[in-house]
């Protein structure tokens, strides 16, 4: 597999603070990787190291199979980025700001600026001074700058920052479209729902460490509903349910049977009737779904 991003033992320490602690990150070409963590988890620091903006204390990073070096080495012409609050020349217009970026990239394509202005719905603000833009539109300008040179890899720190709900959806669709064209995206967020539907994989960072990675199947599994059944004699209940064709698994920790069959979730009363008839009436029966948000909050210790 070709990796668009690959780090090995990547660390950044500020005195006693382990902002990033031995992170091994692998993002495959074409993936949308959601980098999720609470405030202060280490997302921005990781991204800054990835982009060569700060030197790591230990470990290394490769982007598009090229090492990121302390001397500014890296495949920067093929990478677009947005890190923290985007800055712009306040006295220049949106268009002028993007023109400067175009020249810095050495791009001959003069239509590129108009293209990204359109792409980010910035046309009504093209001739406004950047200093007068709202936070959401300034964020769009930052994204426009990241996309201007049609990068293969996008590294975006909290891209939804400051956007209104319609803007969040719009940017999500824009990013999904780019991914369909083959662009690899790493985007950070502290809000799960922002990356949930978009990401093909989610990495959870907590206190500088990458504590879990969820692939699409695991995310789907966590979204899936299940029927939790408790009874005084779980083994008798399991036998009765299995005989009736349900796949009832024992969850010892929760002293419950877990049934994932769609028909059980659609008609839990049928399951209850069956158990009563088998002489092992349920003491508790409930459809539940551990949503991803709860999973994330439990992992990071916010929820007990
Ligand atoms: P947020 O969602 O709030 O932006 P984050 O996940 O991006 O958070 P970072 O900004 O990477 O978190 O910070 C990680 C840790 O490193 C925090 O404890 C932060 O205080 C610390 N840190 C970051 N930069 C520095 C610095 N220049 N000097 C000292 N500590 C720093």
Image: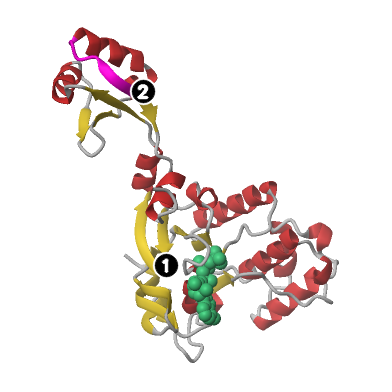
- For residue 21, above or below residue 182: below
Q: Quadrant of the N terminus?
A: bottom left
Q: Position of residue 210 (x, y in %)?
A: 37, 65
Q: Nearer the viewer, residue 119 or 300?
A: 300
Residue 241 visible at all: yes
Q: Residues within 10 Å of mark 1 (few under 14, many from 20)?
A: some
Q: Position of residue 78 (x, y in %)?
A: 53, 74
Residue linked to disc 1 = 207
Q: Residues within 10 Å of mark 2 (few under 14, many from 20)?
A: some
Q: Position of residue 22 (x, y in %)?
A: 34, 74
Residue at 38% over, 77% down? 10
What are the residue bounds of the magenta stretch? 278-285
- For residue 60, above or below residue 3: below
Residue at 42% over, 67% down? 207
Sequence-wise, the earlier of marks 2 and 1 is 1
- For residue 287, above or below residue 120: above
């Amino acid at each position: 597999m070709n990796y668009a991003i690959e780090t090995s033992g990547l660390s950044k320490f500020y005195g006693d603070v382990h902002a990033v602690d031995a992170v091994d990150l692998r993002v495959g070409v074409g993936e949308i990787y959601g980098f999720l963590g609470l405030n202060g988890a280490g997302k921005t620091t990781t991204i800054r190291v990835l982009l060569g903006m700060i030197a790591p204390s230990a470990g290394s990073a490769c982007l598009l199979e090229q090492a990121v070096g302390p001397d500014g080495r890296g495949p920067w012409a093929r990478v677009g980025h947005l890190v923290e609050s985007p800055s712009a020349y306040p006295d220049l217009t949106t268009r002028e700001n993007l023109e400067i970026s175009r020249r810095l990239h050495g791009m001959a394509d003069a239509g590129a600026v108009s293209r990204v202005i359109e792409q980010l719905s910035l046309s009504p603000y093209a001739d406004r001074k950047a200093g007068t833009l709202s936070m959401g539109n300034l964020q769009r300008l930052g994204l426009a700058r990241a996309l201007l040179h049609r990068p293969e890899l996008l590294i975006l720190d909290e891209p939804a920052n400051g956007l209104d709900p319609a803007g969040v959806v719009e940017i999500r669709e824009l990013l999904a479209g780019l991914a369909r064209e083959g662009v690899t995206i790493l985007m950070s967020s502290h809000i799960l729902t922002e990356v949930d539907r978009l990401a093909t994989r989610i990495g959870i960072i907590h206190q500088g460490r990458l504590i879990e990675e969820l692939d699409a199947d695991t995310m789907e599994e966590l979204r899936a509903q299940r029927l939790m059944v408790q009874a005084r004699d779980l083994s008798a209940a399991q036998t009765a349910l299995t005989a009736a064709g349900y796949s009832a698994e024992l969850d010892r920790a929760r002293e419950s049977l877990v049934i994932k069959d769609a028909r059980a979730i659609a008609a839990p009363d049928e399951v209850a009737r069956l158990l009563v008839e088998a002489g092992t009436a349920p003491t508790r029966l409930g459809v539940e779904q551990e949503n991803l948000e709860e999973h994330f909050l439990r992992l990071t210790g916010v929820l007990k």
